[in-house]
């Protein structure tokens, strides 16, 4: 279901709760809302008003992915970037990593399975932005 985007900093600055397999409907809402939102490449559950650690993003080929409970394990190649956020109108200066090692859960056959993956480039930047959302960190 397509949800309205939240831009209330009081909501966005709260750390998200750990997600479970029972939160699959929230993940689908994220995918639906991201697909229906112009220029959306990534979205976190708290941006649709749900304080769960679930994020969605599109990769370089345009395929959508969902991560439950993402955590940044290691970042290499720090650089300064200017980012926009669907929940804010302004540009923000941030420090990101060119390579990010991330742990997360993936929903497979109704169960969350642990995964680890290295991200680079634009996708690494988006994933780090989404992890910040899960942690209640505002850009």
Image (cartoon, rainbow, N blue to C red):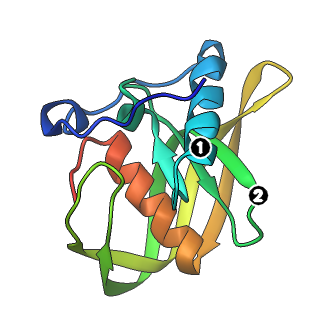
- Of residues 41 and 93, which is closer to you in this image? 41
Q: Quadrant of the N terminus?
A: top right
Q: Position of residue 116 (x, y in %)?
A: 66, 54
Q: Measuring 21% from the left and 30% from the top, which residue is drawn there?
A: 11
Label count reads 2
Q: Is residue 81 left or right of residue 130?
A: left
- Of residues 99 and 63, which is closer to you in this image? 63
Q: Residue furthest left?
A: 10
Q: Quadrant of the C terminus?
A: bottom left
Mark 1 and mark 2: span between their CA atoms? 15 Å
In the displayed structure, 34 sits above or below 60; it is above
Image quadrant where residue 46 sits: top left
Asked if residue 104 can be seen in this view, the reply is no
Q: Residue furthest top?
A: 22
Residue matched to label 1: 36
Which SS class for mark 1? helix
Q: Which mark is residue 63?
A: 2
Q: Measuring 30% from the left and 42% from the top, which residue is drawn there?
A: 135
In the displayed structure, 79 sits above or below 48; it is below
Q: Is residue 20 left or right of residue 113?
A: left
Q: Position of residue 23 (x, y in %)?
A: 59, 18
Q: Measuring 51% from the left and 62% from the top, which residue is drawn there?
A: 39
């Amino acid at each position: 279901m397509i949800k309205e985007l939240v831009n209330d900093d009081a909501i966005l600055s709260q750390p998200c709760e750990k997600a479970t397999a029972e939160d699959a409907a929230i993940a689908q809402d994220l995918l639906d809302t991201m697909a229906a939102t112009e220029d959306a490449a990534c979205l976190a559950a708290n941006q649709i008003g749900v304080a769960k650690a679930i994020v969605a993003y599109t990769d370089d080929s345009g395929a959508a992915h969902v991560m439950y409970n993402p955590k940044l394990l290691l970042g290499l190649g720090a650089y300064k970037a200017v980012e926009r956020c669907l929940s804010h109108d302004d540009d923000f200066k941030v420090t990101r990593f060119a390579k990010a090692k991330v742990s997360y859960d993936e929903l497979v056959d109704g169960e969350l399975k642990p995964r680890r993956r290295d991200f680079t480039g634009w996708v690494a930047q988006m994933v780090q932005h989404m992890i910040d959302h899960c942690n209640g960190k505002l850009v």
